Image (tube, rainbow, N blue to C red):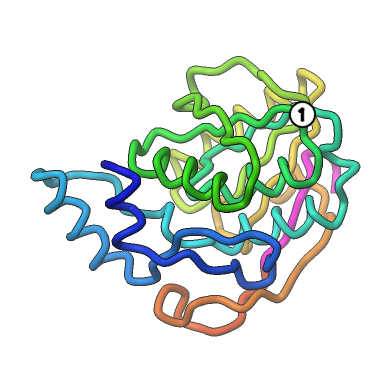
Amino acid sequence: MSAQFVQSVTRLAPVPFVPEISLYQETDLYALWEVTEREAGRTGLDPPFWSVPWPGGVALARYLLDNPAVVTGRSVLDVGAGSGLVAIAAARAGAVTVLASETDPVAMVAIELNAAANQVPPPRCVGSFLDLSVPAEVVVAGDVWYQREMAERVAAYLDEAAGAGAHVLTGDIGRSYFPRDRYRLLGSYDLPVSKAVEGREVLRASVWQVGSP
């Protein structure tokens, strides 16, 4: 998929609650999914999750921009990067290097476009986090707790990262697969969200750190 395609099916707009950052966005996921598969000439592609600023990522981005000392001068890995929102926030907050764990090739294109739109160096896409050792001092993961198998893999990786000395943060809306008993709450935000996507106009998302509650 080309950058021209991504730009043609989305619009560049500020992220609600994080207006310092703009992303190429489209709230109608199903329509965009159909268009993407038609353009690719095949079915079975990943849903275009990269086209929406999900609330856990928004909360993490807001937290990093408001608390830049967390990442300033440090290396950062964004697990399940999607649009690259959190990776871009880390770069804006002063991270020296930013890696994005993302396997969707269309998302990789969107990440580069979004980074360019926000005048930060594009994060280096490194594929699945399952293939990585812990390559960064700070590891962030937004909206990764929506499916049991995925959540178990992410939890194990984040525990490994914390055990290796990384500062580990996650953002989520309180999904049932989030292992809350292993995390400490840092802050919560009431976020404006798309009613078409979330079924409501305001949603609470929180930022958590690996460690005792």
Question: Does residue 143 appear to the left or right of 162 in the view shown?
Answer: left
Q: Considering the image in quadrants, where does the N terminus appear?
A: top left
Residue 144 can be seen, yes or no: no
Q: Nearer the viewer, residue 168 or 152?
A: 168
Residue 202 can be seen, yes or no: yes
Judge whether residue 21 is colored magenta. Answer: no
Question: Does residue 31 appear to the left or right of 150 in the view shown?
Answer: left
* Circle 1 residues within 10 Å: few <14, some 14–19, many ≥20: some
Image-quadrant location for residue 15: bottom right
Tag count:
1
Question: Does residue 74 appear to the left or right of 111 in the view shown?
Answer: right
Check the image and report above or below for 192 versus 184.
below
- Residue extent of the magenta highlight: 205-213
Hey, which residue is sitting farthest left in the picture? 41
- Measured from the top left, where is residue 22 in percent x and y? 58, 61
- Measured from the top left, where is residue 24 in percent x and y? 45, 59
Task: State the SS at label 1.
Answer: loop
Check the image and report above or below for 89 versus 189.
above
Check the image and report above or below for 93 versus 198.
above
Q: Residue at x 48, y 40 (%)?
A: 112
- Measured from the top left, where is residue 197 in percent x and y? 42, 73
Q: Residue at x 34, y 43 (%)?
A: 106
The majority secondary structure of the magenta stretch comes to strand
Q: Residue at x 58, y 33 (%)?
A: 123
* Residue that mark 1 sits on: 96
Amino acid on which disc 1 is placed? Val
Hey, which residue is sitting farthest top in the picture? 133
Image-quadrant location for residue 58: bottom right
- Measured from the top left, where is residue 173 in percent x and y? 62, 63
Q: Residue at x 39, y 41 (%)?
A: 109
Image-quadrant location for residue 70: top right
